Image (spheres, rainbow, N blue to C red):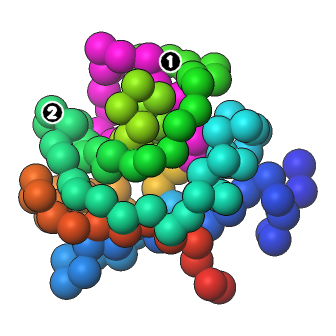
Amino acid sequence: MDEGGSVSKSVVTLEIPGKFKIKCELKRHLSPSLVGTINRSLPVSGTIHMLGTSGVYVESNIESGGERTRKEFKKGDIAFLSVGHAFCFFHKDTKVGKDLTPIGKILDDSQELLKAESGDEVSIYCDAD
């Protein structure tokens, strides 16, 4: 696998102004079509919603069918919910009731997500680095 500035991975930032910026990595091999669509659709802005006690999600206008879905995720995983067009960020291991498509990993401390509150404005954008 190609390391560094490859097209197989892209670094994005999840930011709630005044609270945190978290670097994340989208991995094309997890869901080639969906990750490509996401990369072309960034930046995305929205509102934070709580995903039970295991993470947060952000609705988007990105439409995609589920690719390689699953229901169990580890701390630091990023997934996409096709039905609600939502990015899901997990800060602890969890099992969810819906099929989600894994799309990447949180590179920074996923515990930063605990600072998020329902209704916070958030943006997800490509990192300029």
Residue 86 image-quadrant placement: top left
Residue 107 seen in the figure? no
Alpha carbons under labels 2 and 1: distance apart = 17 Å
At horizontal 36% and vertical 32% (from top left) the residue drawn is 84
Q: Position of residue 23 (x, y in %)?
A: 48, 69
Q: Is residue 102 magenta?
A: yes
Q: Give the class, few, some or many, for how many residues have Cα within 10 Å of label 1's Cα (few <14, many ≥20).
A: some
Query: Which label sits on residue 70?
Result: 1
Q: Which type of secondary structure does the marked residue at label 2 adopt?
A: loop
From the viewer's perspective, is 3 left or right of 88? right
Query: Which label sits on residue 52?
Result: 2
Amino acid at dot 1: Arg
Identify whether 64 is placed above or below 2.
Answer: above
Report the span colored magenta: 89-104
From the viewer's perspective, is 29 left or right of 25? right
- Image quarter where the C terminus lies is bottom right
Amino acid at dot 2: Gly
Identify whether 128 is placed above or below 124.
Answer: below
Residue 47 seen in the figure? yes
Q: Which type of secondary structure does the marked residue at label 1 adopt?
A: strand
